[in-house]
Amino acid sequence: MSKLSLTFVTIFAFASNAEARIHRMHKSSSRGSYCDYEVVRKMEREKDYLSQHNEFLSEHNKELNAIITLNNCKAGNVFAKHNTDKYSINCVPCPENHYRTSTNHTCYHCPEGYYSKSGWTECKKSETNSSDVHTLCEKGKIIGSNKFGIHTASCIECYKLGDKKYMPYKNNHDSCFTCPTGSIVKYGATFCEECPIGHYEKDNKCVKCEVGTYADKAGATHCKVCSNKHSLAFVSTGGYTCENSIFHNMAETFNNNIVNIENILNPIVYGTHKSIAFVSNF
């Protein structure tokens, strides 16, 4: 009999004896609550002992299965511990979208963006974004190029790769898109947004144009110099035009109207003075 079988027999016998002792103690006990307390304590100790042995056997079986797989199953296959005869070793192919190399002790799940057929030794990247893909990376992430990556933890965030990197949809791509100049990455690296007029893009931030400069179009990478002292851009930030400000035009219109009134009133005053002079002389 093998050591593993002896271990199981020993544990079974121990468990049977423990239950028998507890049963006898229940039948013969006449000392009340103290005896019941001792029974419970012994039961807890024995359960704890059995639990520790079960954990040991579980880990032992994992190691044993790994050794059998590595020594007896070819790559792409794994030891079938649930479908094996008592004295034989039965290897079965890894399931679809799983793989096993010659150095792995079990079948591993393919990472996002990769797939496999049953019995494959490694996963393959899909040629397109829609065919032969069982999982994709979320928006704002890419799969990278590691075909042995950990499933559900292999996707790479575009924003971490660079300030202007983004990915707008679920994908199996190995590189991110880059926002054009004058635009910034928005909302979890899922799309780009142009800087508005009166601003320019610098290091993935939209910055207001400085005093004396302006940007009259969205998506600017720099602001233009404004030398028109009658414009708002000449004296304030965020300028979007170098033309005369509306306040200057209003003031200029008002001043022009005052001049026109003087031109109209002057002849009347002159004519009145002339008439008075004529009456006086008469």
Image (spheres, rainbow, N blue to C red):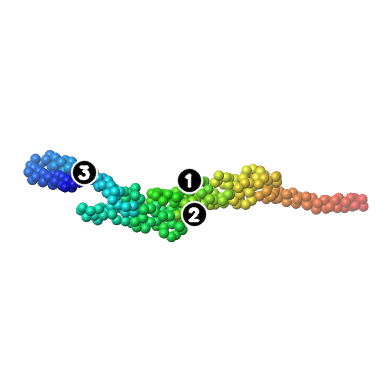
Three-letter code for the amino acid on which mark 2 is drawn: Pro
Residue highlighted by disc 2: 168
Q: Secondary structure at mark 2?
A: loop
Q: Secondary structure at mark 1?
A: helix
Say which residue appears at 73% left-offset and 49% top-offset: 252
Nearest to the observer: residue 85 or residue 213: 85
Residue 160, horizontal then vertical, whole percent: 48, 46
- Discs 2/3, front: 3
Residue 64, horizontal then vertical, whole percent: 26, 47
Residue highlighted by disc 3: 53
- Discs 1/3, front: 3
Residue highlighted by disc 1: 160
Three-letter code for the amino acid on which mark 3 is drawn: His
Say which residue appears at 90% left-offset and 52% top-offset: 278
For residue 37, side relative to residue 275 (left or right): left
Say which residue appears at 40% left-offset and 49% top-offset: 149
Residue 3, horizontal then vertical, whole percent: 19, 45
- Distance between mark 1 and mark 3 Cα atoms: 46 Å
- Distance between mark 2 and mark 3 Cα atoms: 52 Å
**Mark 1 or mark 2: whose residue is earlier in sequence:** 1
Q: Are marks 2 and 3 in contact (CB under 8 Å)?
A: no
